[in-house]
Amino acid sequence: DEEDDDDNGEEEKIIEAKHEKPSQSGSYDFSAIKNEYVPQAFSHFTYENSQTHFMVVDLQGVLKDNRDGTFCYHLTDPVIHDQRMKKGKKKNYQSRSWSFGRTDRGKKGMKAFFQTHQCTDLCRLLGLEKRDSDYL
């Protein structure tokens, strides 16, 4: 991956999760959620919750086991794809309304994500819509 010149090496705390045992009331069994599901599900989540305008992908980092039993991902160097378009002054001219740097591939990047993404139990738990690359 290409590194941005302004990368200061800081890590951001993105997700904290506590593993829970299933309750007697029939709530979800969180033990079925594997830690490796989180980055892909987060990318899918960002797409759905931005109303399909943005997607955060290429998440790299480490999963830390905290003393209190929680886990915390420290993620760096995200790539953001933006597929929003704005109309230009010339007839039928459109351009992307935002750019998140040289790694922002817009709709092509989102399509590439969904070509390889397979929804997991975590995607289903989050209520994310199953999509494939033909959707875009």
Image: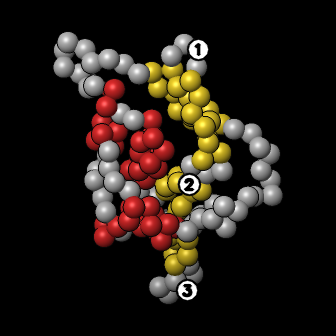
SS for callout 3: loop
Q: Residues within 10 Å of mark 1 (few under 14, many from 20)?
A: few
Q: First in sequence, mark 3 or 2: give its number.
A: 2
Residue 46 makes an appearance in the image: no
Relative to 89, residue 96 above or below: above
The label number, if any, that marks residue 67 in the structure image? 1
Specify whether 43 is left or right of 3.
left
Quadrant location of the N terminus?
bottom right
Q: CA distance from mark 3 to mark 2?
A: 35 Å
SS for callout 2: loop
Quadrant location of the C terminus?
bottom left
Image coords of residue 99 (percent x, y): 62, 64
The label number, if any, that marks residue 90 in the structure image? 3
Q: First in sequence, mark 1 or 2: give its number.
A: 2
Between disc 3 and disc 2, the foreground one is 2
Image coords of residue 2 (percent x, y): 70, 62
Between disc 1 and disc 3, the foreground one is 1
